Image (cartoon, rainbow, N blue to C red):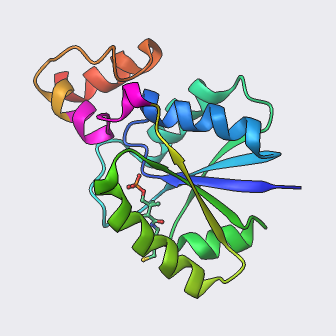
Amino acid sequence: MKKAIYPGSFDPITFGHLDIIQRSSKVFDEVVIGILNNSAKNSLFSVEERLEMTKMLTRQYDNVTVDSFDGLLVDYAKSIDANIIIRGLRAVTDFEYEIQIAQTNKVEYPEIETIFMTTALNYSYLSSTIVREFASYGGDISRFVPEEIIPIIQAKYNA
Ligand code: PNS
């Protein structure tokens, strides 16, 4: 059985992430979305909020589950018995960082395979950072994230 992890910060989850999740769910038997719970990384949303938004938007996939993890990704991968990591590549600028992480993970856990999926062209510009930036200025984020989570994002800036 091919069990894969799709790890990330998902701060917040975007249409770009959802595109990768939908396509991954067709390629792998099981996909675990692993949300990094790292207090050192200043995230806008708590891990509970990120879990809630991600679960809400992926409940239609029978073979996709959502979880959070602390510490090293390879340790988490071992703990859930998964040896495939999925990462999205938007542009060549992502590649340098991603290959370094993938190779480090491979050194730490030789059985791990990182599979890169190219992001859909229409989302190649999109990132959680862009969503936060737009939302912080009251911009329209409906092209970036599903409407269900727009009020949750806007509430962060209207508080
Ligand atoms: O969505 P992001 O922020 O690009 O995701 C990055 C993530 C969570 C995949 C990466 O930071 C990660 O795996 N962090 C856990 C710590 C770790 O294992 N680092 C890689 C080896 S240096």
Residue at image coords 68%, 49%:
32
Quadrant where ligand 1 appears? bottom left
Rendering quarter of residue 22 = top right
Q: Nearer the viewer, residue 133 or 122?
A: 122
- In the image, residue 59 above or below residue 146: below
Residue at 48% x, 57% y is 36
Q: Measured from the top left, where is residue 44 in percent x and y?
A: 28, 43
Q: Which residues are magenta?
A: 121-132
Q: Viewed as shown, does residue 99 lie left or right of 42?
A: right
Instruction: In the displayed orientation, state which residue is furthest to the right.
Output: 1
Residue 83 picture quarter: bottom right
Q: Where is residue 10 drawn, in percent x and y?
A: 43, 43
In this rendering, is residue 28 above or below 100? above
Q: Closest to the observer: 50 or 15?
A: 15
Tag count:
0
In this image, 70 relative to 5: left or right? left
